[in-house]
Each structure stands twice: as structure tokens, then as C-alpha cells.
Image (cartoon, rainbow, N blue to C red):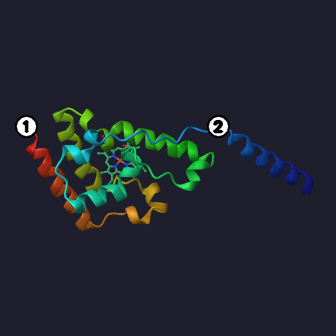
Amino acid sequence: MKKALKIVLIIMAVAFIAIQFYRPSRTNPPVVAAETLESQMQIPQNVHEILRRSCYDCHSNETNWIWYSNIAPLSWGIVDHVNAGRDEMNFSKWAAFSPEKKSRKLEEICQEIESREMPHYQYLWLHWDANMSEQEIKTVCEWSKNEAAKIP
Ligand code: HEC
């Protein structure tokens, strides 16, 4: 019995080491100042700080890759997630959106935070500081609705 347990543990340890060799790359593509949200929109300091704190890890090319994003299998999920977030909306590539798309994204930002779909709850487990207060949600929504209305 004891021996069987030992073998299982050894197999698990070997498997854990083996999967470390598959490393999806954790990228931070260069940020071009003229393409960012900041350069394209009026964005007050307080709104900017909230977005940076709560959204930029997955919606920009300025991801702060947390240490455990280096460890498989966590790394696989995290890299996928950041790539999916960037695909959906990348604040570092805001200029690439058409006016319609900008306006739609701005509206979605408010919807996503009001319904507390964003930031993802799994992300909040280890990023307490990314949690948004009711007041912060209101502040961001007011800004995003205002900006959306400005787009012809
Ligand atoms: C941990 C990563 C992560 C964080 C942090 C995060 N997002 Fe996302 N976001 C995603 C991913 C992945 C998707 C695409 C798939 C999905 O909806 O889950 C997405 C999708 C979106 C969409 C498009 C939704 C749709 O249905 O089309 C919006 C808008 C959005 N996020 C806004 C935000 C805002 C605003 C914040 C900050 C308050 C934020 N996100 C924080 C990962 C993240």
C-alpha cells in the first residue's frame, strides 16, 4: 500500500515537471503612444487609475504578469485569458477600433462592471485591489457613457 502511494507521488511529481516544458509565451507587445485609449479619449485621472488597476492586466499590452503565471498548468489558463481579453478589447490598440466599435465597447465597459462580470471573479481572488467600489463603478460608467455619446 505504502509503495503504491510512493509510486503515485513520483508519477505526479514527474508529470508536474514534464508539463513545465510547455510554455505559452507571456507577451507584452510594444505600446505605441498614438494608439492607446489615453491618446484617443478624454480620460480623467481617477477613471484612468481605476481602469489601470482593474482592467489593464487583461485588456492592454501592459500586463503585469504575476509570478505564478510562470507555473504550468496555471500559466496555460492565464496566458489564454489575457490573450482572449486583449482580443476582445485592447486599450493599447484603441485606435484600431472604428467609431462604432469604440462606442459599443464604451457601453459594454459600463455593462460589464455594473453586472460585476468584469474584472473576472477568479482574478479578484488574488488581486483584491482590483475590486471596484460602487462609487468607482458609477464614476467609470458616467465617463464611458459620456464618451460614447460624443462619438458621432
Ligand atoms: C483577468 C482578466 C480580465 C480582467 C482583469 C478584465 N477582463 Fe474584461 N475580459 C476578459 C476576457 C477573457 C474577455 C473575453 C471573454 C469573456 O467575456 O470572458 C473580456 C471581455 C470584456 C469585454 C467585452 C465583453 C463582451 O461580452 O463583449 C469588456 C467590455 C470588458 N472585458 C471590460 C473589462 C473592464 C472594464 C475591466 C476592468 C474593470 C475588465 N474587463 C477586466 C478578461 C479580463
Quadrant (top left/top right/bottom left/bottom right) for the C terminus: top left
Residue at horizontal 29 percent and vertical 43 percent from the top: 33
Residue at horizontal 37 percent and vertical 51 percent from the top: 56
Give the image location of residue 57, x and y in percent.
Answer: 41, 51
Q: Is residue 82 above or below residue 122?
A: above
Element type where label 2 sits in the image: loop
Say whether residue 34 is left or right of residue 79: left
Residue at horizontal 52 percent and vertical 42 percent from the top: 26
Give the image location of residue 67, x and y in percent.
Answer: 57, 55
Q: Earlier in the sequence, mark 2 or mark 1?
A: 2
Residue 115 in sight here: no
Q: Is residue 138 above or below residue 36?
A: below
- Residue at the disc numbered 1: 152
Element type where label 1 sits in the image: loop
Q: Is residue 61 above or below residue 140?
A: above
The amino acid beneath tag 2 is: Tyr
Residue at horizontal 46 percent and vertical 53 percent from the top: 64
Say whether residue 20 is left or right of residue 35: right
Residue 104 in sight here: yes
- Residue at the disc numbered 2: 22
